[in-house]
Every structure is written in C-alpha cells, then in structure tokens.
Amino acid sequence: MTWTVTAERFDSPDATALRRDYYEEVASRYWLRQATDEEIAAGLADDGADLLAPPTGQFVLGRRDGTAASCAGLVLTEAAGAGTAELTRVYVRPGFRGTGGGGLLLAAVEEAARGFGVRLLRLDTRNDLVEARGLYTKHGYREVPAFHRRNPYAERWFAKEL
C-alpha cells in the first residue's frame, strides 16, 4: 500500500469530495448528530477555500494506491504577519487513518509553506477532534495561547517552527 501526496486544486472533483467529507465529519461531531446535506452545503459556501491556491496558499491531496483519501490546506494570512501561515482542513478518511497518511500530509504542507517563505505554521482545532490533536503533537506541533478569536469553534491552538 503506497501513499502519494501532491498539490491539487481545491476545487478538483477529488478535492471537493474530500472537503465535503471533512466538513460533514467535523460538523456532525460538533452537533452530535448527522449533518444534513443542506448544512454541509451552507458550511462549504464561501468557506474561503479560494485562498488554498497560489499566491495565497496551497491545497494537497493524499492518495493511497490511487484512491483519494486525505487532504490539507495552507493559507498565507496577512493578519498573521510575514513568515506565518495557517494549516487548515486536515482530513484523513476514517478507513485510511492509522496508515501514515496524516504525517505525509503535514510534511507536504510544511514543504509548501517553506516554499512560500513561511517560518511558523499554526492552526486551531477543537477539543473533540482528539485524533487531529494527537497527529499534530506527534509531528512536532506544540500547543500555544490563542492567536485569534475569529473562529467561534476554535478551542485549541498549535504552532510549529519550520
């Protein structure tokens, strides 16, 4: 079984499906019920995904033996200051978790970030996203004080110096 992780447009069919799966999972976990198609569509509308393309960012897609299985994004934000970017939309489909794909996603985003001159990569997450927090910690991200309050769902903040 082989993983490949490559840059891909955030609106390709595979990327769109993964972004939808990501939103469905995080919304359903937050609401403690299955998110509806309408709620998912509303969450994806104007979600800022257009920033996940150069010159403002990058989107990467992971495939395991050719099957789209994971994704992650990088956003360069002026508010964060020069040399800082945010990691976002990190997602590994449940059937592919525990197979090394998450670490490869992070490595690919970090490589892209370095290419943009980023020296500090940071992210926010929620308490209930235990798997994500474990992944970040395992790969050198450390918990930091809140660096913004714009995301009402953010409960934990992490950063990693590149």
Image: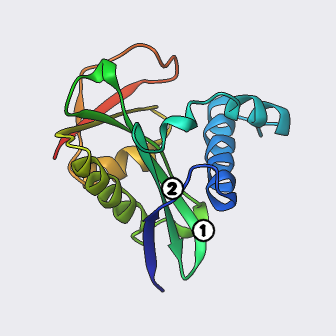
Above or below, 81 relative to 162: above
Secondary-structure class at tag 1: strand
Give coordinates of residue 9: x percent, y percent: 55, 54
Give coordinates of residue 114: x percent, y percent: 22, 50
**Would you say 142 lies left or right of 68 here?**
left
| Mark 1 lies on residue | 68
Give coordinates of residue 128: x percent, y percent: 50, 36
Give coordinates of residue 84: x percent, y percent: 24, 32
Measure the alpha-carbon separation of dots 2 and 1.
Answer: 8 Å
| Mark 2 lies on residue | 71
Q: Amino acid at mark 1?
A: Ala
Q: Quadrant of residue 38?
A: top right
Above or below, 30 relative to 145: below
User: Is residue 44 visible to us here?
Assistant: yes
Outermost residue on the front side: it is 55
Identity of the residue drawn at 71% across and 30% down: 45
Q: How many marks?
A: 2
Identity of the residue drawn at 57% across and 66% down: 69
Q: Amino acid at mark 2?
A: Cys
Q: Are marks 2 and 1 in contact (CB under 8 Å)?
A: yes
Identity of the residue drawn at 39% across and 59% down: 105
Taking depth in this image into account, of 116 and 37 the one nearest to the observer is: 116
Secondary-structure class at tag 2: strand
